[in-house]
Image (tube, helix red, strand yellow):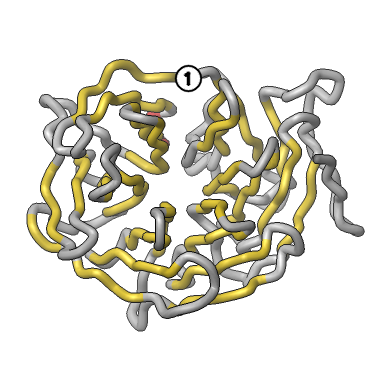
Amino acid sequence: MGLLVPAGTAQAGTHHGSPFPDRIALPDGFQPEGIAIGPGPVAYLGSRVDGRIYRADLRTGKGGVFSPGPGTPSLGLKTGDGLLYVAGGSGGDARVIDQRSGKVLKRYALSTVPAFVNDVVLTRDAAWATDSTNPVLYRLPRGVRGKARTLPLKGEIAYGTGVNANGIVQAPDRRSLLIVQSNTGKLFKVDPRSGDTKAVDLGGESLPNGDGMLLNGDTLYVVQNRLNAVAVLKVARDGSKARVVKRISDSKFDVPATVAPYKNRLYLPNARFTTTPTPETPYDVVAVKP
């Protein structure tokens, strides 16, 4: 579908003469982190600065801001049910946005203490979000009805300084969740009923700076942001074991944070964490083959 750029919003894109460009420019100073794609060739990106949501057409690279943001971050994103589920970072919240209008339909205040709500995954009946500061997961109902609840994490995970639980996916059998801990490079399996965590056997490997994750069948992609790499793992059906089979790197990477698929490509926003941000700093989304 074509996208209409809202009035007063600058268009951004590159390689306009080619379908599905491999680099899509975002507004200067945007500071992207999360990405979600679909339905169709439409990407949604959140700003760490003020929570704006940018919508881009993957076919043309053109787009615009369609949800203005609350002034606090928008980090991990997922689409489903005609809705966009947004992790609110240091705002300590999560939001549910109408994909057609950009209107915030529901806001959940998830924590009464400082928090960093980082990433989100959709399961059959819930949206689960990580907190990189507090050892908990947040469970939101699918849709806009119901209340959020907090699930304390216990077992083998131990929170320390820096970014803790970050990216989150379901295990291949959909009975448990997998979370990556950025500061330790460990991957954990989480029981969504009890909060019990067990370290996934990585065969001696580690995933330092692990950020956004994507599961496709039994293949797990883990973005290692400051390493400018995406680790590709084969995961046991129950999520107890995983093996790194390769790492993807690309000259277009500039500290990518998260990943989303469309057809035979992976799309990653360059968060540029190692670049001092200014209102004029350029940002983009890049596409690579898996």
Question: Residue 167 at x, y = what percent?
Answer: 36, 47
Quick check: 117 left or right of 281? left
**Considering only vertical position in the picture, is 96 above or below 278?**
below
> Quarter holding the N terminus?
top right
Farthest left residue?
Answer: 155
Q: How many marks?
A: 1
**Considering only vertical position in the picture, is 78 above or below 255?**
below
Report whether residue 182 is seen.
Answer: no
Q: Residue at x 22, y 41 (%)?
A: 187
Farthest right residue?
Answer: 7
How many neighbours does mark 1 have within 10 angstroms: few (below 14), some (14-19), or many (20 or more)? few
* Residue 169 falls in image quadrant: top left
Question: Residue 253 at x, y = what percent?
Answer: 53, 27
Residue indicated by mark 1: 290
Question: Residue 81 at x, y = what percent?
Answer: 58, 57
**What secondary structure is marked by label 1?**
loop
Report whether residue 59 is seen.
Answer: yes
The three-letter code of the residue at mark 1 reads Pro
Q: Residue at x 56, y 21 (%)?
A: 264
Question: Residue 255 at x, y = what percent?
Answer: 48, 35
Quick check: 211 left or right of 282? left
Q: Residue at x 87, y 49 (%)?
A: 4
**Considering only vertical position in the picture, is 52 above or below 36?**
below
Q: Nearer the viewer, residue 198 or 1?
A: 1
Q: Nearer the viewer, residue 59 or 47?
A: 59
Quick check: 101 left or right of 124? right
* Residue 134 falls in image quadrant: bottom left
Quick check: 276 left or right of 152? right
Q: Residue at x 40, y 55 (%)?
A: 124
